[in-house]
Amino acid sequence: EVSLNKEQYLQNKEIFFDDEIISDSRSYKQLNNKRKQRTNYLNNINNNNNNKAQKEKCLLIVKPHLKPQHINSMKQMLINSEFEIMSERHANLPYDQFVDAFSNDEDQSIFDTICHEWSSGEITIFILSKVNAYQTIRTLVGPDDPEIARSEAPSSIRARFGQDRIRNCCWYSSNIQQYNDKLDHFDY
């Protein structure tokens, strides 16, 4: 099955309509050429669709200290980076759930403080989808420390909305294994 978007259709509509009346062999040849163009065009679209890279799913969890307008700005940044927001959920979860979920991921020197931050209020959980999602989210979110983010990636999420290493506004899955693991921890 082949689908065309509006732009593809408008650019190539002349090959999709057989509106000529065949009155001589010249018209018949033109019509035949048009049909060949249409077939070739559709075959190319089909081949391109088959060769497209697979979308990756990514988890983004926003910490409780972010204000609703900041979360809305983050969503706009995600959309501008061509992420599809597949799901958005808000939850208040207990300290123990964060300890269980992040015991292998966080800097152990600040682990307890981070878990207290996570459990201090409502978090927002996004499931995102995009080709090269992990590479894009890493760049979009920026370094863990907002101070470093402000100097190295000033337009990143953490540079704009992070306060310090504890309240650095969000966590994201950096690979498919983390994505699947955290989905289980957060009852998705």
Image: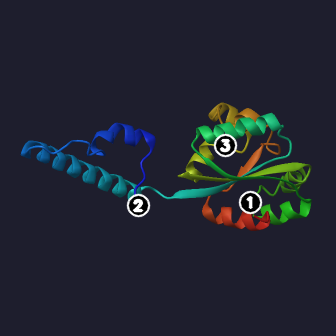
- The answer to whether the residues at label 1 and label 3 have Cβ atoms under 8 Å apart is no
- The answer to whether the residues at label 2 and label 3 have Cβ atoms under 8 Å apart is no
- Mark 1 and mark 2 lie on one chain; the one further toward the N terminus is 2
Residue 173 relative to residue 67: left or right: left
- Mark 1 and mark 3 lie on one chain; the one further toward the N terminus is 1
- Residue 106's place in the image compared with 15, above or below, is below
Residue 111: x percent and y percent? 84, 56
Residue 5 relative to residue 88: left or right: left
Q: Amino acid at mark 1?
A: Asp
Q: Amino acid at mark 2?
A: Glu
Residue 6: x percent and y percent? 44, 41
The foreground one among 108 and 33 is 33
Residue at 69% of width from left, 41% of height from top?
75
Residue identifier under label 2: 1
- The answer to whether the residues at label 1 and label 2 have Cβ atoms under 8 Å apart is no
The foreground one among 10 and 104 is 10
Residue identifier under label 3: 141
Residue 44: x percent and y percent? 31, 53
Residue at 57% of width from left, 57% of height from top?
56
3D distance between C-alphas at marks 1 and 2 = 43 Å
3D distance between C-alphas at marks 1 and 3 = 17 Å
Instruction: Evaluate whether residue 174 shows in this view.
Output: no
Q: Amino acid at mark 3?
A: Val
Q: Nearer the viewer, mark 1 or mark 2?
A: 2
Residue identifier under label 1: 105
Task: Tell me if mark 2 has few (under 14), some (14-19) or many (20+) residues whose alpha carbon lies within 10 angstroms of its own.
Answer: few
- Mark 2 and mark 3 lie on one chain; the one further toward the N terminus is 2
How is the protein colored in the picture?
A: rainbow
Residue at 71% of width from left, 45% of height from top?
144
3D distance between C-alphas at marks 2 and 3 = 37 Å
